Amino acid sequence: MTDILENLAHIKERLHIACSRTGRDPEQVRLVGVTKSVAIERIRQAVASGVSVLGENYVQEARQKIDNLADLKPEWHFIGRLQSNKAKTAVELFDWIQTVDRESLALALNREAVKKEKFLPVLIQVNVGGEDTKSGAAPGDVLPLYRSLSKMEALQLRGLMTLPPYCDNPQDVRPYLQKLKLLLEQLRQAAERPEQLTELSMGMSHDFEVAIEEGATLIRIGTALFGSRPTA
Ligand SMILES: *Cc1c(COP(=O)(O)O)cnc(C)c1O
């Protein structure tokens, strides 16, 4: 128990300091505990310690974890690469989908959410670095994707998410995060209801303070909370 509690206390302290540097309210930054390859007992400890939002990359791995932790009622966000043929399971299991990056996937999610009579909060994932290895919509495709999403009755677009290029020095990631923030501002200008577009999911264990300075509202933290993952 103690290592997760200690890690969490340390993350919160850093979160508060980053917020105070930029005059932000710490309540506006939610910590998403990233659970890929983490054992269920450790995830349970994190939720018991106050981590109420969890992020999972794999639909398959998620089911067991979600069933097992149902009594604690955490909010589950999907943060991995999603194939359209897994949309049905994803809608069934997850409260939010952070990685919508193409119209075909949005249509599949909407279809399943309509069937389940469920409103599904989603984020558009943006490939801010234009990297071949990463999924995410190209920055220029975000506005057209937003326009088609806004016609899908069961999807609620809440903002943008990114997995920027890895930089050894977290300061170097700043321009990519600023780009995501700018894209959200552009969407808000085009939106009928800009008050719904509030979320910026960016920042991970090694760069979340920079992300908070740049306006992150959801920081996705794996190793800083749970320790390092086994390397494949
Ligand atoms: C693994 C992962 C994280 C967490 O990364 P850490 O560096 O362990 O904090 C965040 N977001 C996504 C999309 C991930 O796949």
Image (tube, rainbow, N blue to C red):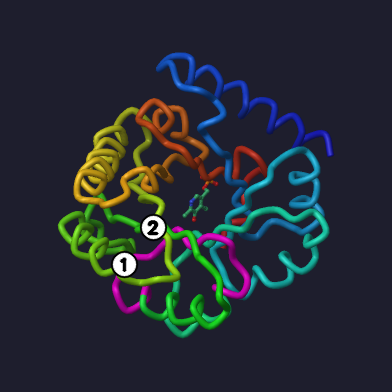
Task: Tell me: residue 151, above or below residue 129.
Answer: below
Residue 79: which disc?
none
Q: CA distance from mark 1 to mark 2?
A: 7 Å
Residue at image position (69%, 42%) is 51
Question: Within the magenta stretch, is there residue 104?
Answer: yes
Q: Which residues are magenta?
A: 91-106
Answer with left or right where residue 210 lies relative to residue 91: left
On whether ligand 1 comes within 8 Å of the CB at mark 2, the answer is no
Above or below — where is 61 with respect to 225?
A: below
Residue 211 part of the magenta segment: no
Looking at the rendered image, the quarter that the C terminus falls into is: bottom right
Query: Which residue position is annotated with label 1?
Result: 149
Residue 193, percent from left and from top: 32, 49
Q: Position of residue 185 (x, y in %)?
A: 24, 40
Neighbourhood count class around disc 2 (C-alpha, 10 Å): few under 14, some 14–19, many 20 upward:
many
Q: Quadrant of the N terminus?
A: top right
> Residue 178, position in %: x, y?
26, 35
Pointers 1 and 2 in contact (CB under 8 A)? Answer: yes
> Which residue was labeled with disc 2?
157
Q: Amino acid at mark 1?
A: Leu
* Residue visible at 43% across and 30% down in the picture: 212
Residue 88 falls left or right of residue 148: right
Judge whether 37 appears above or below 53 on screen: below
Left or right, residue 207 beside residue 74: left
Taking the spot 42% from the left edge, 60% from the top edge, the residue there is 156
Q: Position of residue 209 (x, y in %)?
A: 46, 28
Q: Count neighbours of disc 1 (C-alpha within 10 A) and say few if under 14, some if 14 to 19, many if 20 or more.
A: many
Q: Say what amino acid the circle numbered 2 marks.
A: Leu
> Residue 162: in sight, yes or no?
no
- Asked whether residue 55 appears in the rendered view, the answer is yes
Element marked by disc 1 = helix
